Amino acid sequence: MGCMTRQELRGRSPAELIEIILQQQKRIASLEAQVAALQDRLEEVTKPPKTSRNSSLPPSKSTKANSKGNRGSGKKRGPKPGHPGRSRRRAEPDAIIECRPKQCSRCKADLREVEQYLVGQNQVVELPPIEPVVIEAHQYSADCPICKHQETAAYPEGMEAERVFGNRVEALSSYFHQVQHLSYERLERTFQEVFGLKICQGALVNSIGRTANRLKPEVEAIRETIRSSSVIGSDETGARVNGRNYWQWVFQTQQASYHIIVPYRSSKAIEEAMGDASPDVWVSDLFSAQLKNPAQTYQICGSHQVRDLQYPIDADRCRFSYQMQQLFLRAERLAKHRDDLSALHFQQQVLQIEKTCDELLCMEVSSKRGRQLQRRYIRHRNHLFIFLYRPDVPFTNNDSERDLRNSVIHRKVSGGFRSDWGADAYATVISVVETARKQGQQILATLQTHIGPPAPIMRACRPP
């Protein structure tokens, strides 16, 4: 229908005018729907993409731009200005080679009897030849001349009758497979090509199972240590077990880590791992199951909030999100300088942060994404700044995420576990490994210590 003049409209009957108005209303509604759809499409095209820097999207899902490298950036290689350089410290040498001149290169004079003086030193670290050592134990028995009892000597520890490979070999198998992510096939080749030791994949599987069983008492002690802690951090990540989706959970403190792999992501996992433990503070992200544990209070991860607030800033230029993000960063800086400030000054700063937070949560927010975050912080108002009142509570849950980093790599490299016992064995070993790493212990040595002593190595003495 084209445009009608006033004269034409006056000539129409009331019924015709009503019909014209209804048609126009229908047309207007259709056009408004098209405009709304185009606006949504335009927003989708023009808004910045979600990345690991402005949301909780994991870094593996972010699109990474091509790096210019040092050639394009113009940055000089090496440490930053003002940072002292570091070189390898000299170690106590196991062998010394004397490099003395024997003859003058100019006149051919003999220099062996001439006094010589030290002008330089150079150290090279080398590995000795790597080869397996086969130890054979001979078991003897004797008849007692008095009571006629036959006494048989026991095999020494590490040389039991059912054993084929020593504890060092089994510890190294677990280290390569579960810490360095070598598959059983590659592990078999590594032992053959590097150590000259032939071990079939079945023997490697059995070895790793025995290692996990020997580590269970230590893992149970780690669990009890964490359960008795006043501050516990936790996180979870996906796992694949026998073609099914499982979840790997970590419960950790500054000195210990406890891992489990279970087929559910609910709070049941927390109940199984922590039992009736009720810590003062539970540090985690905002996953609902994490917030169902019986802790006295919670500290939600500040780094997650800083990233989540970045997206409304990028997409909507949201003032609330920017000011709330700055408040979180300000609180983090204040916590870092806790020991540099007087108690009174620190407390005044904390009260100012709390007051500013309350003001921001009452602010009128126009951005939809900003309003969603504002409602989140109103709901969790008492869980935002616990770290300002307790020095033992961190601002972030990064320690839990770091504990899971090795497991994520293992999942990507191996594709998952073929059996439930394999997942359980991995969780057992990685609990000991991450705990040892936190305590500054050498990983392989720690595994060897908990598994048991190596077989006694003696020089074979053969009669002439």
Image (cartoon, rainbow, N blue to C red):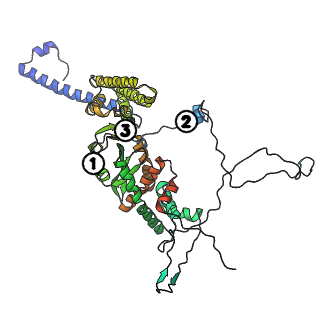
Q: What element carries label 3?
A: loop
Q: Which mark is residue 68?
A: 2
Q: Is residue 93 left or right of residue 320?
A: right
N-terminal label among 1 and 3: 3
N-terminal label among 3 and 2: 3
Q: Is mark 1 on a helix, strand or loop?
A: loop
Q: Locate residue 130, reporting x and y percent.
A: 62, 62
Q: In which quarter of the image is the N terminus?
A: top left
Residue in the picture at 42% in, 25% down: 342
Q: How far apart are marks 2 and 1 (CA)?
A: 45 Å
Seen in the picture, residue 318 relative to 241 is either above or below; the reply is above
Asked if the residue at tag 1 contacts the one at tag 2, i.e. Cβ–Cβ closer than 8 Å, the answer is no
Give the labeled residue for mark 3. 56
Q: Distance between the residues labelled 3 and 2?
A: 26 Å
Which of the two discs, 2 and 1, sits closer to the camera? 1
Q: Which mark is residue 463?
A: none
Given the current orientation, which residue lies at the most extreme front position? Answer: 146
Query: The disc labelled 2 sits on which kind of residue?
Result: Lys
